[in-house]
Image (cartoon, rainbow, N blue to C red):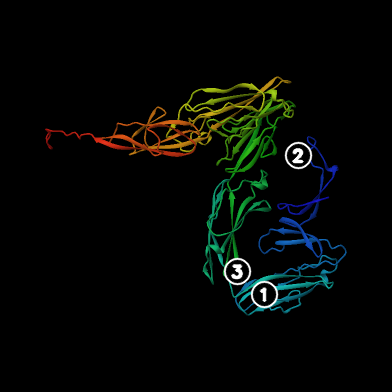
Amino acid sequence: NSYLYAEYAISGIYAITPDENERCDYPKCDPPVPAYKQQAFSDKKKVVGLSFGPHKGKQAMYYIVHLPSGRDGEGINRISFSGSGNRDPKASIEASTTVGFLPFTVSFDGTKSFDPDDGDTDNLTYEWDFDDDGLVDSTEAKPSFEFTKAGVFNAKLTVRDGNGGSDSTTIRIDADNSPPGPRIISPFPGTSFAVGDKIVLRGEAFDAEDGQLPDSALSWEVRQHHNNHYHPFLDPTTGNNIEIDPAPPPEDFFEYTTTRSYLAIHLTATDSAGLSSTTVLEIHPRMVNLEFDSKPSGMTILLNAEKFTTPVSLVGWEGHKFEIEAPVQKSPDGSMMSLKSWSEGMETGVSTADYTVPVDQPSQPIMATFHASRPVPVIKSIDSDFVFSVGDSFELDGDAFASDGVTRLSDSALSWEVRLYNVDADDYVTLLAPTKGNKLSMPTIPEPNSVVFNHANGLKYGKDAAEYNSPDAAGLGYLEVILSATDESSGKTDTTRLIVEPDIVEISVDTVPSGIDLRVDNQMVTTPAIVSTWRDHSFNVKAVGGQFLNDKKYEWVQWSNGKSRSHKVKARKDDSIVAEFEAVESLPVPEISGYREGRD
């Protein structure tokens, strides 16, 4: 009745078993402690997989270890129950060198071999086969051997405990061969990164025997180091010009994590004989000092769910976007308080804010301002990534907590209102007047009152627009969803608002030849032009004949979509339509008579 799991970063295999004595519920324990007891099962490091399988007619646990190549223990290992029976020893080899030119001598050492049974290690015997011929070349614990033939040899050591237990291991020896020399070209030494950056891995390798090695001989691995351990970030990948996108955020906000973390880039080159060599380059994050505070000071804030008491100073990584939360809580003087606002310019929710670490250290602390606690309304059915189209109707579902931040209010305490700000409109129309209740159906989105031509921001609208400083800086309209909650026990009300942007479609309109005017929703526009509008909006286009361009008169011939001169276009997706015109006559070219060059 136990569960085994492995912990990669801290290392070890652990067993957890049910134990009610361990239980500690919230709020006594924060975070709560489950009713399970944890015990160390094994101190094995860097375990990435566990599985049970057969072994000598019984079951054993097999575990996979991920370590830098060549380290003892890398690969598949086994833990089995032997009871009082004899256990096999563990063979281990060390060598003074593994590569050399003929003739060369290698000193071997097998004394790191051991036996788990008490007293058996001192009685181990050694059998060495250095040249792969199947014969025992030495029975010493620390022998030497001279290699006189070129080739790749797997020197083998077999250890025996005298009680029927044995184990073997090998080490590769390359005779008359030299390892290749890998070089990392990109990123350059000294490169630093911001969270979200794209990093390109590019390198080369030269081998004395093979010459310039192909990209297929290169293998990349990236490890994300945190203080004194690391996590695999990019598993061994063959090739060149490998992209890492995006660069990672820090693991947490503790000093040893943010200031002692980096990416270690390993480039391994392998020659035609299978001999490899690795070079390593470290790149570090660009760090920014941050300060967080509150009014009043001494309040609790959560940074990516980690608790801190204000004021707090920490180190962030440039470009790291994370959530800050200011929960309802007691102030230092004992009164209940909830969040009033975050620092100006931050994208905020009810009690949260999304903060992105800037390039330079902020001149002022990131500030959470509290006030006497109010109800906490939360919009659940819509989020900041939601967009709307013409004809949409969606459910308004929310939640609210009383002023204590714990008690959930009933649906009758909620009131919804929805406002539609149309394209280039100075005011709004009410789609849903203030209505009490929850899980309400919102009226369908109507057609916009106009379209926008040649939008300056291309495909970027709303919060992504270059000049964004208000909900409708892009001029394309938006919805404002308002949820209010009233706590009848305290008589206090609070409101949260969510801006929902339209799903924008772009229709390119043009003429042949370009430069002729078209009528779009009763507005004349000179081609070529881009029409930006809400998805599923139907707008009218009309080709107007009898226009003059470059001293020629043009009449409409046809539309590229085969429709009539004046017709409706439904903006289902980004598209283009073209009106074809033909010249029907030319204007006479005026001439000036009675003028002779050279006379005034």
Q: Nearer the viewer, residue 593 or 161?
A: 593
Residue 490, quarter of the rendered image: top right
**Amino acid type at mark 2:** Pro
Report the residue marked by disc 1: 106
| Gap in angstroms between the C-alphas marked 2 and 1 | 57 Å
Report the residue marked by disc 3: 274
- How packed mark 3 is, by other alpha carbons closer than 10 Å (few <14, some 14-19, many 20 or more), is few
Report the residue marked by disc 2: 31
Residue 132, quarter of the rendered image: bottom right
Q: Position of residue 260 (x, y in %)?
A: 65, 50
Mark nearer the N terminus (2 vs 3): 2
Q: Position of residue 218 (x, y in %)?
A: 56, 62
**Amino acid type at mark 1:** Val
Element type at mark 1: strand
Looking at the rendered image, the quarter that the C terminus falls into is: top left
| Gap in angstroms between the C-alphas marked 1 and 3 | 20 Å
Pair 2/3: label in front: 3
Residue 234, quarter of the rendered image: bottom right
Mark nearer the N terminus (1 vs 3): 1
Above-or-below relation of 322 to 416: below
User: Pointer 2 and pointer 3: residues touching (CB < 8 Å)?
Assistant: no
**Amino acid type at mark 3:** Gly
Q: Position of residue 351 (x, y in %)?
A: 65, 31
- How packed mark 1 is, by other alpha carbons closer than 10 Å (few <14, some 14-19, many 20 or more), is some
Q: Position of residue 28 (x, y in %)?
A: 80, 36
Q: Nearer the viewer, residue 554 or 41?
A: 554
| Gap in angstroms between the C-alphas marked 2 and 3 | 52 Å
Element type at mark 3: loop
Q: Is 236 placed left or right of 40 in the picture? A: left
Above-or-below relation of 125 to 1: below
Q: Nearer the viewer, residue 383 or 70?
A: 383
Pair 2/1: label in front: 2
